[in-house]
Amino acid sequence: MRIALLTEGGYPYLRGESALWCDRLLRGLDGHQFAVHALSRSARQERAGWCELPANVTRVRTAPLWGPGEPAGGSARGLGHGFHGRRVRRRFREYFSLLAEAVCTAQYGARVDALRGAGSAAGAAVVTSQADRFAAGLYGLAELAAERDGLGAALRSEQAVRILQAACRAPGAPRAAHAAQVEDLLTVAERLERALRPLSLDWYGLRGGEAGLAAADLCHAVGAGPAALPGLLAHRARGVPLLVTEYGVRLRAHYLTSAASAASATGAVARGVAGAPVRALLGSFQRLLTQETYARAHVITPGNAHDRTWQERCGADRTRLRTVYPGMDPAPFDAVGERAADLPPRDGCRAGGAPTLVWAGRIGPAKDVSTLLHAFARVRETVPGARLRIVETGPPDGPPRPSAAGGDGDDASLPLCRALAARLFPADADGACPVAFDAVGSRAVPTLADAYAAGDVVVLSSAVEGFPVSLVEAMFCGRATVSTEGGAVREVIGGTGLVVPPRDPRALAEACAALLGDGARAARLGAAARARALELFTVRQNVEAFRALYLEVLARHPAGAHASDRAQVPDGDVAHPARLFARPAESHLPGRWAGAARRGAGTAPANPDGHRSTGAAGRAGRRTSTARLPAGGAAHTPSWAGQDRQADGPPARNVPLRRAAPERAAVGAEPEEATAP
């Protein structure tokens, strides 16, 4: 099967948990071919280079979502001058006005005039909702970009800014949009141009040349942001099914972050200009793009029930949702987890040390380490010899961990936490302090597994949390956990740890003291946690889940349905539905049997000259092919007919049937191709 993997700021670049997950997925599904289409977020990301690609990656195409962008020659001239300049500018104004009205207003019931232009799929229709206006404008701009080789110059033009200004001043626009100034509109226009750059790419096989995404059997988008735009266009133009994976809902991150964190973490707006009008307009655009992606995706895979709830509230059809937990490699933690099977002494401390709490992560406001320090002061009242180790994971300039929306490390948080710890826990006469700050990679903590091995109980004190990666790592190590409720914490922990309300130092201290004082209970919880993590959160279960989903999507939604049929009827109600497996996933492989498979079983017989008959069978509406038979008019012989296919000439006679390898044979493969991956 040929899979087009669509990423934004992740694979194949070196940084980020998303890139690591994609790499594990591609290496696990080595029987499929992957073409990676990546959108980069920064120049530093591109300078970092690519990770080592597996052998089943056949092509990598990249495009930047940063910088001013190079204006496409055809679009810059065609939209401003040229023989058809006025007509093209009028079409751009109509399409972009629809998109701007949907982003800037909340009123429904606008009417779309007849959109002029060859091949326009919108036509004359009554658009009854904000989402319909957004979709009509988005796909109209995509058609215009395919005709004019890009829209970069038009989306940055004065005309685009004036259209945004008129939409913000229109009746029904929110108060934040009414307050937009010229600099706000310029910023929004710039960010919209970057987000819509996938419309101007030549990835879709619409401008001649290579087929691009049109040759894929399935598009797999990592996220519902700009990365999903190529999948939406390939689905609309070529009928390629779309699967969307979200480990952390991007729209939720936009809502939860402040102006400063939005500038640095999501890249939605530039630092210093993230005013209320900019955040409101870009948030509206992100919401509409997310809703359109959810509406068109055939399958959506959230990473946990918390993300699933957000997706349902954003309009995702629950029948298309399949929860697939992120896969993590337990191997680095196996040695620690296996040693944790031995019960510690009943005094609660492991051999050779005082009872110790461990916190691991990127220190930032969302992690709420200050609450943990205040709680540890209460723990010391109950367990005087207790110690706390705060371990920061990753280098200072490394990628943010995906556990919390807006939970990226903050340069100012670490000094504040150190100062608070020094005030709450002054050093004794020997200069010792019960709170220690370490970092993974230092001499004291060479690896992340060593950080968890140094503690009896692992603590998570986050005020805002998504998928708690650190808790899963602690579970692999067989450690009992105390965590604050939020995001997918309770779903991940199950009954193998203690969960307390966030921002409650007293409850957090009582739970930590209870486990530090009862080592046997902590060991039992740790053993149960390790068993749960090995069952639910490994790379193997993640890869096998997507292997089954790929087959499900291809079986239920064959690629290549005619675009004109989809344009006339709602999505999913195609007037002439395609046959299941009408284009098998292996039909692109070389060989005469593949060409015969593409011809289909119900086509008319061939004449001696190699052309197909135009008799009743052809007039009955059956799908025909222009492919010719080899010289001599030899008919295709199925693989089960017992004849050995040769590279040249007619099939050999009286050759016994050879059985294919039972495990690696592809469905419908010839005997000599049975061991192909």
Image (cartoon, helix red, strand yellow):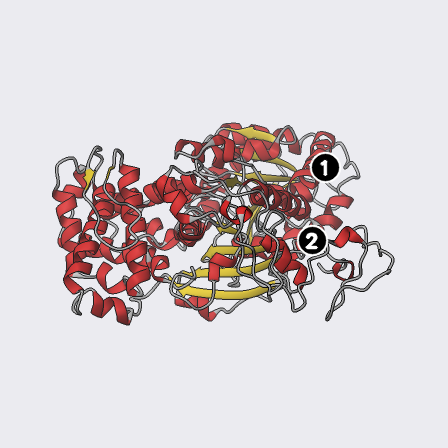
Q: Residue at x 17, y 68 (%)?
A: 83
Which amino acid, by three-letter code, is at mark 2? Pro
Mark 2 burial class by Cα count in 10 Å: few <14, some 14-19, many 20+ = some
Q: Residue at x 81, y 50 (%)?
A: 662
Residue 54 x/y as whole percent: 63, 64
Residue 459's quadrant in the figure? Answer: top right
Residue 60 x/y as whole percent: 51, 65
| Earlier residue among tags 1 and 2 | 2
Which amino acid, by three-letter code, is at mark 1? Ala
Compared to residue 619, the image places residue 516 above or below, namely: above
Q: Is residue 189 visible?
A: yes
* Mark identifier at residue 531: 1
- Residue identifier under label 2: 332
Q: Quadrant of the C terminus?
A: bottom right
Q: Secondary structure at mark 1?
A: helix
Left or right position of 95 against 448: left
Q: Secondary structure at mark 2?
A: helix
Residue 291 x/y as whole percent: 37, 39
Q: Nearer the viewer, residue 49 or 651?
A: 651
Q: Nearer the viewer, residue 676 or 667?
A: 667
Q: Residue at x 19, y 52 (%)?
A: 184
Compared to residue 498, the image places residue 458 above or below, namely: below
Q: Is residue 1 visible?
A: no
Mark 1 burial class by Cα count in 10 Å: few <14, some 14-19, many 20+ = some
Residue 211 x/y as whole percent: 47, 63
Q: Looking at the image, do the residues carrying marks 1 and 2 touch, with CB atoms under 8 Å apart? A: no
